[in-house]
Image: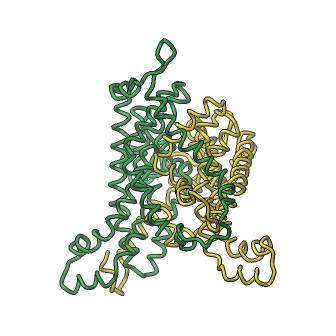
């Protein structure tokens, strides 16, 4: 991929709007299958059909969601998982990114390769590997047993199952986004601070973190958007109840056959993620236009 | 961490990172690989009692495995071909032509990325329910097609914009037709990046699980969907392990070809980094 030009600057081949015809199909697809479903979901869940055949504004489905104990415990489980994953991702990925930015040893190339590798492992294979390693009688149990130690309390089918899987899955892009942000920290700034006697922590706190705060926010937003409504990993690795919003919506839609309730749950996830979503999209657009 | 900036001695930080990441990232996959080539592995032996290919024969003899392999490949080819057919001309238009609303339409492809993905899929499924597309092949094609649009437009736009315009103009000056210029100058330069975009969208579609499961199941059963049912209901561990190895092949091909793209800074910038 090459560095993009400004989308605003083009040397026009033709000034007539032929271009509109060429872009029409994908644009209409986005309008039909992204923008319309979102509008439709909000409208559909905010109106009820009155007995005389008309429709009236009603937030009934939402008041049900926010008064139903099971829905609320699924929501709080989702919030907990998202929060824990975002925090763990920062704790794990920031040191890796810092190391990769400031090291030029041969080991660094190997570390970078490993950190990016999960991008090339589909989450379904990850789930299977997780169960084989950390599940009951998995490899960890085998190794502990062989040295005479007791079994672990397996995280499989507990809230920690999806946390471990989702963190593993999100390491590559978090590292890449943070590393891209660390590119803005100049070696001179670091050396200058060190010359005046700044310790490692002071360096990190006063010089590096302020310069990459935007990248940290982008990385967190991206992770939150992906984790909040994650489906595959929580469905396979998580507990049956309470469940995360992804499996909850899927079950409501396909097994309980209550599409309106499922769409209400979807709009609730939109509401919780809207700040992260807008921030994320704004950052991507800004980068693309710059 | 930051201290390694000037040190030239043994890179202990790096060695610790490398060891931990190898343990956490490579080890679980090695375990799955081992299971796939194991005939007998009973608890509590640390290594398998008998290695062999017995379960490859058994897995590959299953009809559901073959039908889901062909379903996955058909879906991925259909979606990628459709996506290329509608996105590449659009990408060319965005890169080279001026028309009303160009910027707005270009950034409209980001719309889907402002929302949590599965929530959006449920909203789309609500529309498909009214159109009777639930449980159909074309319903899954549509939902996976939407997922490829952003990549299949934005990456080729960057590729078309990076083509050296002076070469195109020179060719036109010596009398080449617009089609000839496109075929002989533009395409060879933009080609490799576009091929990477097509490969990424093929692999992405092949592994797309959530849309296929929400819209397609149980009628449309792709390889990842079959894998979910193996994990949930199949007591023979080796079936899942063999299927995992098979499933990983497209990712391995992508890994070989796309690593350069992924490691370049512009890839992370494409994600907002």
Outermost residue toward the left in this view = A197
- Closer to the camera in the image, B179 or A217: B179
Q: Which residue is drawn at 49% across and 51% down?
A: B113
Which chain is the one coloured yellow?
A: B
Outermost residue toward the top in this view = A52
- Closer to the camera in the image, B34 or B233: B233
Horizontal side of A275 relative to B87 (left or right) equals: left
Q: Residue at x 50, y 54 (%)?
A: B46
Total labels drawn: 0
Q: Which residue is drawn at 35% across and 59% down?
A: A217
Which x, y percent locates residue B242? 65, 50
Look at the image and tell me in which quarter the N terminus of chain A lies.
bottom right
Outermost residue toward the front in this view = A16
Q: Does residue A263 sit above or below A226 in this rendering?
A: above
- Closer to the camera in the image, B231 or B162: B162
Which x, y percent locates residue A287? 46, 66
Which chain is the one coloured green?
A: A
Q: Does residue B2 sit above or below A115 in this rendering?
A: below
Q: Does residue A71 sit above or below A112 in this rendering?
A: above
Which x, y percent locates residue B217? 63, 35
- Closer to the camera in the image, B62 or B205: B205
Residue B235 seen in this snapshot: no
Q: Does residue B84 sit above or below B158 in this rendering?
A: above
Residue B85 seen in this snapshot: yes
Horizontal side of B258 relative to A248 (left or right) equals: right
């Amino acid at each position: 991929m090459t560095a993009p030009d400004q989308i605003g600057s083009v040397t026009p081949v033709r000034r007539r709007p032929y271009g509109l015809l060429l872009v029409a199909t994908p644009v209409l697809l986005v309008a039909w299958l992204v923008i319309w479903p979102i509008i439709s979901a909000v409208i559909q869940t905010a109106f009820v059909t009155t007995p005389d055949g008309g429709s009236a504004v009603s937030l009934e489905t939402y008041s049900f969601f926010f008064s139903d104990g099971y829905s609320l415990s699924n929501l709080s489980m989702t919030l907990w998982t998202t929060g824990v994953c975002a925090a763990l991702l920062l704790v794990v990925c920031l040191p890796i990114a810092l190391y990769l930015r400031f090291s030029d040893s041969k080991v660094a190339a190997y570390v970078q390769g490993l950190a990016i590798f999960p991008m090339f492992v589909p989450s379904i294979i990850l789930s299977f590997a997780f169960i084989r390693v950390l599940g009951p009688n998995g490899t960890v149990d085998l190794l502990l047993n062989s040295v005479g130690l007791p079994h672990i309390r397996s995280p499989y089918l507990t809230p920690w199952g999806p946390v471990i899987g989702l963190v593993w899955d999100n390491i590559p892009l978090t590292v890449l986004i943070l590393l891209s942000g660390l590119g803005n920290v100049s070696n001179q700034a670091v050396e200058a601070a060190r010359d005046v006697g700044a310790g490692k922590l002071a360096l990190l706190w006063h010089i590096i973190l302020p310069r990459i705060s935007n990248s940290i926010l982008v990385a967190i937003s991206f992770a939150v958007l992906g984790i909040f409504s994650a489906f595959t990993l929580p469905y396979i690795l998580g507990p049956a109840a309470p469940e995360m919003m992804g499996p909850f919506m899927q079950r409501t839609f396909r097994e309980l056959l209550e599409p309106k309730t499922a769409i209400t749950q979807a709009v609730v996830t939109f509401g919780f993620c809207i700040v992260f979503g807008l921030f994320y999209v704004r950052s991507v657009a800004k980068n693309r236009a710059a | 961490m930051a201290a390694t900036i000037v040190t030239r001695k043994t890179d202990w930080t790096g060695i610790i990172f490398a060891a931990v990441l190898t343990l956490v990232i490579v080890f679980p996959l090695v375990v799955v690989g081992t299971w796939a080539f194991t005939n007998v592995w009973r608890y509590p032996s640390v290594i398998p009692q008998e290695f062999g290919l017995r379960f490859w024969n058994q897995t590959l003899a299953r009809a559901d495995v073959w039908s889901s392999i062909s379903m996955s490949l058909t879906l991925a080819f259909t979606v990628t071909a459709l996506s290329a057919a509608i996105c590449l001309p659009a990408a060319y238009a965005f890169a080279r032509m001026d028309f009303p609303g160009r910027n707005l339409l270009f950034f409209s492809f980001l719309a889907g990325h402002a929302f949590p993905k599965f929530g959006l899929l449920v909203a789309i499924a609500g529309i498909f329910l009214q159109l009777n597309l639930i449980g159909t092949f074309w319903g899954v094609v549509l939902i996976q097609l939407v997922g490829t649009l952003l990549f299949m437009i934005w990456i080729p736009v960057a590729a078309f914009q990076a083509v050296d315009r002076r070469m195109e103009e020179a060719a036109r000056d010596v009398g080449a037709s617009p089609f000839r210029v496109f075929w002989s100058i533009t395409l060879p330069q933009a080609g490799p990046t576009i091929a990477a975009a097509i490969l990424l969208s093929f692999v992405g579609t092949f592994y797309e699980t959530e849309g296929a499961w929400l819209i397609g199941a149980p009628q449309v059963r792709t390889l990842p969907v079959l894998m979910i049912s193996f994990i949930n209901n199949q007591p023979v561990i080796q079936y899942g392990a063999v299927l995992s190895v098979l499933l990983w092949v497209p990712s391995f091909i992508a890994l070989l070809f796309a690593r350069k793209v992924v490691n370049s800074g512009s890839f992370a910038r494409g994600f907002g980094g």
